[in-house]
Image: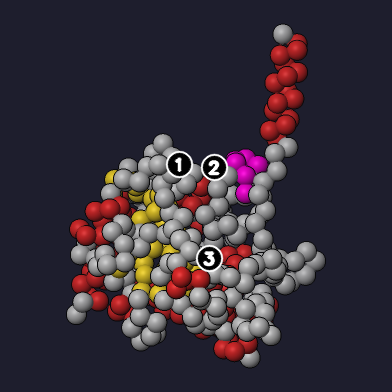
Amino acid sequence: MLADFFFLLLLFLALLGVEGVDYPGGWLPGTQQCVDICTHSSAEPVCPTRDPACLRKKQQPGDYDFLLLEQLFLPQFCRDLLAGVDPTISHRNVNKYPRGITCEPSLAVSKLSIHGLWPNYNAGFSACCNVSNAIRNQPLDALGFAAKMPDLLAELGQVWVDPTQQSSFNTLCELYNHEFQKHGLCYTADGGINFDQSARDYFLWIHTIAEVTSLPGTIVGVAEFGSRYRRKGMAGSMGFSTNRSSTSGLVCSAANVSSPTAADLGLCQFAKDRSSQRDFASCLVQKVQGECRGVASACYFFDWMLALWVLDELDELVSNSKR
C-alpha cells in the first residue's frame, strides 16, 4: 500500500515537471525589444504539394496571389490553451492547465478576433520574408510603434485581441510582432527604407479590413449550446464562390477531437488592389493545416447566437460584394 502511494506521488511530481512548449516570441529579457522570431526561418516558401508555380516564388514582399484574413473564436482559443494547444504558435509555456499560459478571464469574451492577415500563394504560403537579399527581416520596433502610433495601437486593441495579454501594448511583442514578422513583411516592406511605415501599413490595413467585414462583437448573456455547421455545405448555402475550394473556411479546433469545435474562420480576397475591399469575403478557404483530425464533416460553435450572426453577417457581405 505504501509502495503504491509513493508510486502515485512520484507520478504526480513527474507530471508537474512536464515542461511547456515555448514558441519563439515575446520580449527580450531585460529589454523593451521584441524577440526575432525569424532568425532560423527558411528562405524558401512553403509548398505542401510541391506545385511548380509555388516553388518558383521568391518569397518577397508583395509577391502573393491572395490574402487570407484569419479570425479566432476567442472562447475556443482559450479552451485550446487550457488543453495545451496554441493555434497562433506564438506564446511561451503552452501546457495543459494548470501548468500553462491561460487567458485573462475578462478578455475571454464570446467574440471573433483577428488572428492575422496572411499573404498566400495559390498552392502554398510565404513566411518571414526578407526585404531583399541585402536587407533581412527584422522585429517590430515596439516602443517606437507605441510612441508614434498610439491611436492605431488603441484601435487594434479593440479588433485584434490577444486574451493572454492585459493590454495591446503588452501584445506588441507577442501576437502583433509574430504576425508582422512572419506575414506583415511578406505583405509590404517599403523597400526596407522605413520598417515603422511597413508596420503601420500592415496594421492599418488589418484594422480597415476588420471594419469592412464587421463580424459580430461581444455577445452578452448567451448560454452555450452546440450548434452544428457542416463545413462542406456552409459556403454553398451562403452563396459564396467556391472556385478556390469546395470546403468552407470554418476550421475545427485541434484540441477537441471527440466533439470538434469551431476555432477559426478564414476569409480570402483574390484582388491585391487595396481599393477592392468589397471583394473581401467573396470566398471561403480551408487552411492547409485545418483538418479536423479525422472528423471533417462538421464543427460546433459553442455559442449558437454567434454562429447565427456569423452566417447572417457573411451572407450580407457576399451580397454587398456582388453589387
Q: Is residue 241 left or right of residue 80?
A: left
**Dominant secondary structure (helix, strand or loop) of the stretch shown in magenta:** loop
Q: Tag 3's secondary structure?
A: loop
Residue receiving disc 2:
83
In primary-sequence order, the first of circles 1 and 3 is: 3
Q: Tag 2's secondary structure?
A: loop
The question of residue 142 being in magenta is answered with no
Residue 149 seen from this side:
no
Residue 255 seen from this side:
yes
Residue 242 sits above or below residue 119 on the image:
above
Residue displayed at 65% across by 49% down: 21
Q: Quadrant of the N terminus?
A: top right
Disc number placed over residue 46 in the picture, else none:
3
Q: Is residue 46 left or right of residue 13?
A: left
Tally of numbered discs: 3
Q: What's under tag 2, amino acid-wise?
A: Ala
Residue receiving disc 1:
256
Disc number placed over residue 5 in the picture, else none:
none
In primary-sequence order, the first of circles 2 and 1 is: 2
Mark 1 nearby-residue class (10 Å; few <14, some 14–19, many ≥20): some
Q: Nearer the viewer, residue 166 or 93?
A: 93
Q: What's under tag 1, amino acid-wise?
A: Asn
Q: Which residues are magenta?
A: 94-99
Q: Nearer the viewer, residue 143 or 238?
A: 238
Q: Quadrant of the C terminus?
A: bottom left
Residue displayed at 74% across by 25% down: 10
